[in-house]
Amino acid sequence: MYAVVLVVLLAAVGGSVFRALRFDENLHTVIPNEVYRSAQPSSVELKRWIEELSLRSVINLRGERVSSWFKKEQAVTEAHGVDLYSIALGNGAMPPLKALRQLINLLDTAKRPVLLHCAHGIERSAIASAVAVLLVGGDVVETREQFGLTYGFIPGLDEHPKMLDDYEQWLAMRGWPHTPDRFRRWVENDYVPFFYRARLEPLDVPTSIGNGSVAMLRFRATNTSPQPWRFRSKQDRGIHLGAKVRLLEPGGEHEIELRGGFRDLTVAPGEAVVLGLPVPPLPKTGRYQFFVDLFDEEGGWFSSMGSEPLIFELRVVASEKSWEAVPIFYFTLSTPLAHNFGIPALTQLLKELTILSTVPLGKPAEACK
């Protein structure tokens, strides 16, 4: 066992050193005179490539940042009349649906020649280059060549391009060869990054609650992805139900986040589960917007990968007792609780909660970090 671990560590260290020595610029041709790929260019490199390759567009796959590298890149492209676009492509295995659609649109519309780049020119540049090849009619086997040692891609160390696996499987199930139109159709209608797709339905959601009341909202979540969901009872593991809540009144610019659905459960594709979302007392009256979604503690909100969240408004009305400040709880329930909780039941409710962090209402959500 120790020998295996040692081999893996040596491969990782050796691969990193190898790439640092060999793949600094990592500039390569994807489609001659039209599409190129690279690592993050320096200002000097980008100026040279604009002149030598007659670049007219640059697509930054790292997402728009406030870092110095982006500001330098922006300055160079503006000075040379080159269009600069930014897409947060995520990892190189399965990009978020929105980002993949943006990439296809830019590859259709951006002036060419175009440069695609990420940080090292390996994973994200590879998936973007693969998409470029598919859009001009290259087959899936040809696109896999973008994930080779020539570009610094090391199997086992870098993210395997699962997107291509899923597309190839989709074609095989229908007995179809690849065409650019079929790839576009697949992305638009059937592409699901990993397990990040759900259908959420409200089951027990009141239109209003009192500003001194604690409520339990209930939702049905149906797994519409091709992979199982794994919920966990621990707050830092697995999938949970979550919500971002914001007051739609003056002074309501800060969001709070809630969590629920803390249980050990596997939900297979096509199955559904009923989940509760506890809502603590909200002392300010007015309209609140609830953004309800599933949350993967390792990957983030499902909606960031293309799933549709459930968005609705809930009104908090004045009750007999109101508090100037109460804790905001990020919690899990240890035993089943009733649907609504009035103020007299609050003490008992708190006994049922595992409080992860608190902050007085009215203070920025950053105080919880």
Image (cartoon, helix red, strand yellow):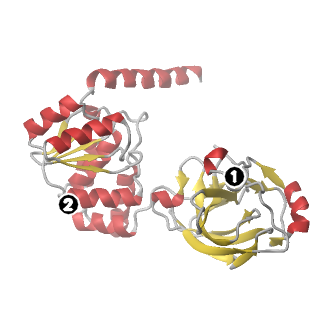
Quick check: 203 above or below 306?
Answer: below
User: Between marks 2 and 1, how big is the CA–CA gap?
Assistant: 42 Å
Q: Residue at x 43, y 22 (%)?
A: 13
Amino acid carrying label 2: it is: Asp
Q: Earlier in the sequence, mark 2 or mark 1?
A: 2
Give x and y (percent) for residue 215. Answer: 77, 69
- Number of numbered markers: 2
Left or right of 256, for residue 300: left
**What residue sits 23% from the left and 40% below the top?**
75
Residue 163 point in image, percent of width and height: 38, 53
Give how far across and how far down residue 161 sits, in percent. Answer: 37, 47
10 Å crowding of disc 2: few (<14), some (14-19), many (20+): few
Q: Secondary structure at mark 2?
A: helix
The image shows residue 89, relative to residue 274, as above or below, that is: above
Residue 36 in sight:
no
Q: Quadrant of the N terminus?
A: top right
- The residue that label 1 is drawn on is 232
Q: Is residue 295 visible?
A: yes
